[in-house]
Image (spheres, rainbow, N blue to C red):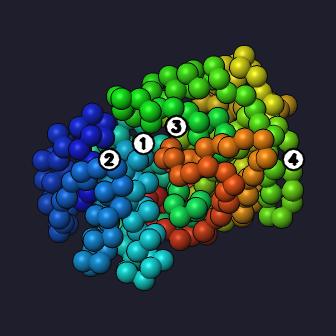
């Protein structure tokens, strides 16, 4: 059990006694550890897998899930062992738990861990980082870069929206080349979102058709969109209806490469900065086992 002490304003730590008692009631044997810094949960996960843990549970939000998933996938790739990802969602948004259909209340999620329901899902990879939700290039990655500069850090919808408004002032679409499974596209883009799951950023359904186990990445390309258009489209992103707008295109691919001769653009994976373009995203089909319902979730 990896507890992020700052997720959800400290919700995981406050509710740990309840979680512990519920785990005992379900007859689960466990060890609890606390992450102490960014990316620490990756190392804790590697240690847990090497120590023989069969289930590693992220008690936190989407950032904690991202790190634990990276630890599990690294352990598998490096031959250190394999384990299943469990989630007790105590973050502000819990986008990934929602997409998986995991109960969002702590008692229900804790009991669900003992249900035996396992599901193999896809993961994405960009540079040396894995992602399970959404990665991207352009405006949303620049929002992440902006929010990371702030002295105060918080998660969820409000900080992201503030970052959107701040970044929008100075951001403009950029000429890029993106290659989808070998097919080359050149155009001016506002952002390129690469979805393994359909939602991120506190409920934004950025890739509304994405399915977690279809072996494909959903690629949503917002073209030459201005500031006023962006503000008008923003509510539609929460509904997942923005993809019908004339300047938004949707593709599916197993590999996506993005370059630009015009300027450098940030790249994010699950809301974490992972570098700048040029960059390549790849899908890893059914490479991560999770405790989750067997039926795929979608916004519709």
Kindly tell me whether residue 22 is visible in this rendering. no
Residue that mark 2 sits on:
60
Residue that mark 4 sits on:
186
Instruction: Give me the C-alpha separation between circle 4 and circle 3.
Output: 25 Å
Residue at the (41%, 29%) spot, across then down: 150
Residue that mark 1 sits on:
94
Instruction: Give me the C-alpha separation between circle 2 and circle 3.
Output: 22 Å
Q: Is residue 98 above or below residue 30?
A: above
Q: Of helix, strand and loop, which one carries label 2?
A: strand
Instruction: Give me the C-alpha separation between circle 1 and circle 2.
Output: 8 Å
Q: Indicate the position of residue 230 as horizontal and vertical percent values.
A: 70, 23
Q: Of helix, strand and loop, which one carries label 4?
A: strand
| Image depth: mark 1 or mark 4 in front | 4
Label 2 crowd bin: few (<14), some (14–19), many (20+), radius 10 Å = many
Q: Earlier in the sequence, mark 2 or mark 4?
A: 2
Foreground pick, 35 / 97: 35
Q: Of helix, strand and loop, which one carries label 1?
A: loop
Asked if the residue under mark 2 is in contact with the one under mark 1, i.e. CB atoms within 8 Å, the reply is no
Residue that mark 3 sits on:
145
Which of the numbered marks, if any, corresponds to residue 253?
none
Foreground pick, 289 / 7: 7
Identity of the residue furthest to the bottom in this view: 79
């Amino acid at each position: 059990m990896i507890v992020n002490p700052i997720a959800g304003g400290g919700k995981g730590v406050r509710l740990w006694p309840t979680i512990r008692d519920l785990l005992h009631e379900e007859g689960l044997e466990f060890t609890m550890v606390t992450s102490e810094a960014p990316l620490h949960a990756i190392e804790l996960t590697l240690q847990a897998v090497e120590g023989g843990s069969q289930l590693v549970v992220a008690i936190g939000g989407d950032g904690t899930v991202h790190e634990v998933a990276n630890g599990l996938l690294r352990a598998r790739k490096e031959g250190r062992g394999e384990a299943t990802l469990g989630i007790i969602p105590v973050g502000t948004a819990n986008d990934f738990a929602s997409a998986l259909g995991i109960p969002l209340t702590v008692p229900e999620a804790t009991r669900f861990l003992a249900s035996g329901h396992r599901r193999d899902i896809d993961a994405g990879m960009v540079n040396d980082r894995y992602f399970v939700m959404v990665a991207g290039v352009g405006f949303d990655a620049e929002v992440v870069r902006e929010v990371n500069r702030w002295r105060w850090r918080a998660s969820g919808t409000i900080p992201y929206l503030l970052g959107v408004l701040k970044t929008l002032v100075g951001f403009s679409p950029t000429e890029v080349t993106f290659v989808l499974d070998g097919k080359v596209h050149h155009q001016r883009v506002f952002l390129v979102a690469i979805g393994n799951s359909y939602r991120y950023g506190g409920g934004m359904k950025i890739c509304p058709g994405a399915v977690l186990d279809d072996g494909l990445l959903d690629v949503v390309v917002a073209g030459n969109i201005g500031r006023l258009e962006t503000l008008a489209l923003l509510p539609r992103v929460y509904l997942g209806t923005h993809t019908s707008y004339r300047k938004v295109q949707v593709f599916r691919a197993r590999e996506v490469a993005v370059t630009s001769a015009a300027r450098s653009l940030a790249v994010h994976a699950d809301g974490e900065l992972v570098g700048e373009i040029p960059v390549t995203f790849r899908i890893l089909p059914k490479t991560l086992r999770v405790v989750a319902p067997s039926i795929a979730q979608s916004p519709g």
